[in-house]
Amino acid sequence: MRALLIFSIVALTFLTAGCAGQQGGGASGGGAQGASAPPVNAPTYSDGDEFAIRLAPEMATALQLPGDLVMVAKHDGNSVVFASKQSGNSEAGALTFEVDPQMCTTVFQYNDTTIKFRPCEEDIQFPLTVGKTWTVVYGASTGGGNYIQQTGTGTVLGIEDVTVPAGTFKAYKVESRHGPDLRTTEWYVPEPIGFSVKVESTAPTAANWELVSYHRAGSK
């Protein structure tokens, strides 16, 4: 079960994958920068915001999900729930994750598997500033009320250009670690996206994905 939880925590990143920011252009790998950039607060979402993501083949296979998913935002009290849209390859809600107002993940579900976090799993900690570091301790459970304690750390490495199917952006590059072997790097783009556009992981089963397109409700 521990191996499943660790992989699930990594997969979760694409949600946290929803967060704050800045915009721009060029391919990833152009040196982190932006130490003087202003702090970036957690994003806000409207019901109906959509984020199309493309999972790496190994991640799609491990989670038994199609490679392409459209995640749709909807509020549930103070939380925001992102649930996959019905498609020809999957049922609505085949992948779902729930976050609190600071974009900290509380629930992650794929197909019939549900992982709950107490208090929450935090790969990105707002406000974002270049050079910021943090450590969080939380519990993760797949049911039965038994939580496995996890310790995570995060660092905002800088701001750099990254290119994904959705376009080229200036992104905050954030690295997080869970345990001795699990390291995840994600590129978060603030407004107008307010979502991570790329995730790479060193997990045994890599949790990698990219943003294909996005649509914020109310925008043309």
Image: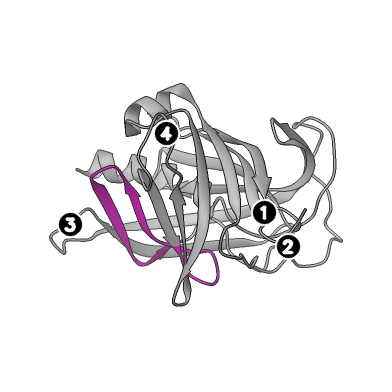
Task: Kindly identify which numbered label has been placed on residue 129.
Answer: 2
Q: Mark 3 points at which residue?
A: 143
In the image, the segment drawn in magenta is 99-121
Residue 152: x and y, percent?
Answer: 44, 55
Q: Mark 1 points at which residue?
A: 156
Amino acid on which the number 4 mark rests in the picture: Ala
Q: Mark 3 or 1, which is nearer the eye? A: 3
Percent across and percent down for residue 163 are 75, 32
Q: Gap between marks 2 and 1, in whole Å? A: 7 Å
How many discs appear?
Answer: 4
The percent coordinates of residue 186 (x first, y second) are 60, 43
Residue that appears at 41% across and 55% down: 97
Mark 3 and mark 2: Cα distance apart in space? 36 Å
Counting residues from the start of the chain, the first of labels 2 and 1 encountered is: 2
Q: In this view, does 84 lie above or below 181?
A: below
Asked if residue 199 lies left or right of residue 107, the reply is right
Task: Specify the quadrant that holds the N terminus.
Answer: top left
Residue with the mark numbered 4: 203
Compared across the picture, whether 78 is left or right of 107 comes to: right
Q: Which residue is drawn at 61% across and 65% down?
A: 45
In the image, is residue 28 above or below residue 101? above
Q: Alpha-carbon neighbours of circle 3 within 10 Å: few (<14), some, or many (≥20)?
A: few
Q: Is mark 1 on a helix, strand or loop?
A: strand
The residue nearer to you, when weighing 218 against 17, is 218
Q: Which of marks 3 and 4 is nearer the N terminus?
A: 3
